[in-house]
Image (cartoon, rainbow, N blue to C red):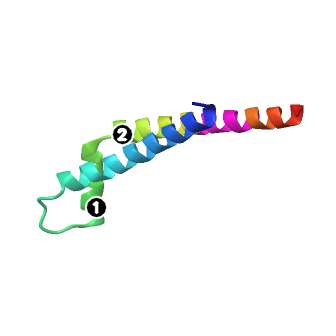
Amino acid sequence: MNNKGVGVVFCLIAAILAAARYVAAAVFMSNVSSWSEELFQCGLEYVGSPLKIMAVVALIVGIVFLVLGVCQDLRKSKKD
C-alpha cells in the first residue's frame, strides 16, 4: 500500500473516532426525557477527550501521509 492509501485509511479512522465520540454521548444521554444543547455538551464532557485526541492525531497522520504520497508522485512525474 502506498502513502496515499495509508493516508486515506488514517483519515477514515479519524472520521470513525470522531463519530464514535458523538454516538457515545448520545447513548449516554438516551435515557433523558428532554434534550438540549447544554445537556448534550455535558454528555460530551462525560465521554471525555481521548476519542477527540485520537481523532485529531489520526487526521494529522493521514494528512501527512497524503501529502507525502502526492509529493512522491510529483517528483516521479518530473523525472519522466
Q: Residue at x 30, y 41 (%)?
A: 48
> Relative to the observer, which residue lies in front, 25 or 67?
67
Classed neighbour count for the residue bearing mark 1: other residues with Cα under 10 Å, few (<14), some (14–19), many (≥20): few
Q: Is residue 80 left or right of residue 74?
A: right
The amino acid on which the numbered mark 1 sits, given as a three-letter code, is: Glu
Q: Is residue 14 left or right of residue 41?
A: right
Q: Is residue 13 visible?
A: yes
Q: Is residue 43 visible?
A: no
Q: Please report contact status of discs 1 and 2: CB closer than 8 Å, yes or no.
A: no
Residue 10 on image: x %, y %: 50, 37
Q: What secondary structure is marked by label 1?
A: helix
Q: Which residues are magenta?
A: 63-71
Residue 46 on image: x %, y %: 24, 45
Q: Residue furthest front?
A: 80
Residue 21 on image: x %, y %: 32, 47
Q: Which mark is residue 54?
A: none
- Is the residue 27 above or below the residue 49 in the image? below
Dot placed on the residue nearer the N-terminal end, 1 or 2? 1
> Relative to the observer, which residue lies in front, 13 or 60?
13
Q: Which residue position is annotated with label 1? A: 38
Q: Which mark is residue 51?
A: 2
**Does the magenta portion include 68?**
yes
The amino acid on which the numbered mark 2 sits, given as a three-letter code, is: Leu
Q: Residue at x 61, y 31 (%)?
A: 2
